[in-house]
C-alpha cells in the first residue's frame, strides 16, 4: 500500500535563502509521524509548503495524487488539513462559528456529525460553544484550532507546535487526543519542539536541522539515540 502522504526531494526557499533542502518524508495510514528540531530548523516551512501556502520544488503526493499544483481549498477537500502554530482563530466569533468555518466544503449533514465528534473529543468546547474564541484560554484555543481542522473530516491532520505555550497538563491532554485520532483512523504529521512528548506518542520520527533531515526511523529508536537525547531530550543515555 502506498503512503498516504509522500514528500520527495522537496526544497523551499525564501528568496535566495533555502529554508528546506531536498527532504523526503512519508506518512502512512493510521500513523503518527513527528518532525522534531530546534526553532528555525525549517519544520513550519515544510508544513506550509505541503499545505500549499508556500511554493516548493519537488514532489508531494497525497492519496496517490500529485498535489503540487492544487490550491489549498482542493487539498482540504481531499482530506489534508493544517493546524497552524499561531492557531489563526477568529477571535470575535464564537466557538461554534469558528467550527462551522472548518466545514465550509462539506454537506450540512456531515458537518453536524463532525461537530458532534469534535464535541466528543473536546467536551470543553461544547460547554463554551457560545463563547467568543478570543476569550478562551490558550489550551482551549488550541483545542478549537484542532476542532476546526477536524470539521472537514481530514485523512491527514498536520499539527504545527500544538504544545507551544501550554501547561504540561494541557499538553498531555492534547497529545492524548492525538493518539485517539490515530485510533479513529486519522493520520497525524506532528511538528514539535517538545521532542520528549512527541516521541512518546509517535510511530516514526524525523530529526530536522538547518533545513535537512539528519535522522529518521521508529520513534522509540530515535528517542534512544545519544545525540537526540543530548540535544532535544535534555539528558544522555550514558
Image (cartoon, rainbow, N blue to C red):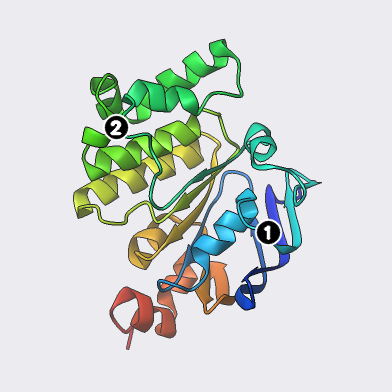
Residue 181, horizontal then vertical, whole percent:
46, 38
> 61 or 99, which is in the foreground?
99
Q: Measure how far apart labels 1 and 2 are at the Cα level.
A: 31 Å
Label 1: few (<14), some (14–19) or many (≥20) C-alpha neighbours in 10 Å: some
Task: Look at the image and tell me whether residue 205 can be seen.
Answer: no
Which residue is label 2 attached to?
133
Which quadrant does the C terminus fall into? Answer: bottom left
Q: Residue at x 33, y 42 (%)?
A: 142
Task: Say above or below: 92 vs 195.
Answer: above
Q: Is residue 234 above or below residue 1?
A: below
Q: Position of residue 97 (x, y in %)?
A: 39, 22
Q: Which label was assigned to residue 55?
A: 1
What SS does tag 1 mark? loop
Q: Position of residue 8 (x, y in %)?
A: 73, 64
Where does the image place residue 124, in percent across and percent down from the top left? 25, 28
Q: Are marks 1 and 2 in contact (CB under 8 Å)?
A: no
86 sits to left or right of 3: left
Q: Is residue 15 left or right of residue 180?
A: right
Amino acid at each position: 500500500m502506498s503512503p498516504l502522504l509522500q514528500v520527495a526531494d522537496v526544497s523551499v526557499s525564501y528568496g535566495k535563502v533555502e529554508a528546506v533542502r531536498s527532504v523526503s518524508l512519508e506518512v502512512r495510514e493510521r500513523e503518527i509521524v513527528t518532525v522534531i528540531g530546534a526553532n528555525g530548523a525549517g519544520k513550519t516551512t515544510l508544513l506550509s509548503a505541503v499545505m500549499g501556502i508556500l511554493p516548493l520544488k519537488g514532489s508531494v503526493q497525497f492519496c496517490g495524487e500529485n498535489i503540487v499544483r492544487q490550491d489549498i481549498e482542493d487539498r482540504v477537500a481531499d482530506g489534508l488539513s493544517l493546524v497552524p502554530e499561531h492557531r489563526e482563530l477568529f477571535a470575535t466569533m464564537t466557538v461554534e462559528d469558528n467550527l462551522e468555518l472548518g466545514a465550509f466544503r462539506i454537506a450540512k449533514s456531515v458537518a453536524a456529525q463532525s461537530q458532534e465528534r469534535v464535541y466528543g473529543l473536546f467536551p470543553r468546547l461544547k460547554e463554551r460553544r457560545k463563547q467568543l474564541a478570543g476569550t478562551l484560554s490558550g489550551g482551549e484555543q488550541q483545542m478549537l484550532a484542532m476542532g476546526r481542522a477536524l470539521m472537514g473530516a481530514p485523512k491527514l491532520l498536520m499539527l504545527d507546535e500544538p504544545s507551544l505555550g501550554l501547561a504540561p497538563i494541557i499538553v498531555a491532554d492534547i497529545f492524548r487526543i492525538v493518539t485517539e485520532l490515530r485510533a479513529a483512523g486519522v493520520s497525524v504529521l506532528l511538528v514539535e519542539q517538545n521532542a520528549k512528548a512527541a516521541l512518546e506518542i509517535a510511530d516514526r520520527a524525523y530529526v530536522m536541522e538547518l533545513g535537512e533531515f539528519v535522522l529518521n526511523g521508529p520513534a522509540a529508536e530515535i528517542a534512544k539515540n545519544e545525540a537526540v537525547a543530548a540535544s532535544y531530550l535534555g539528558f544522555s543515555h550514558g
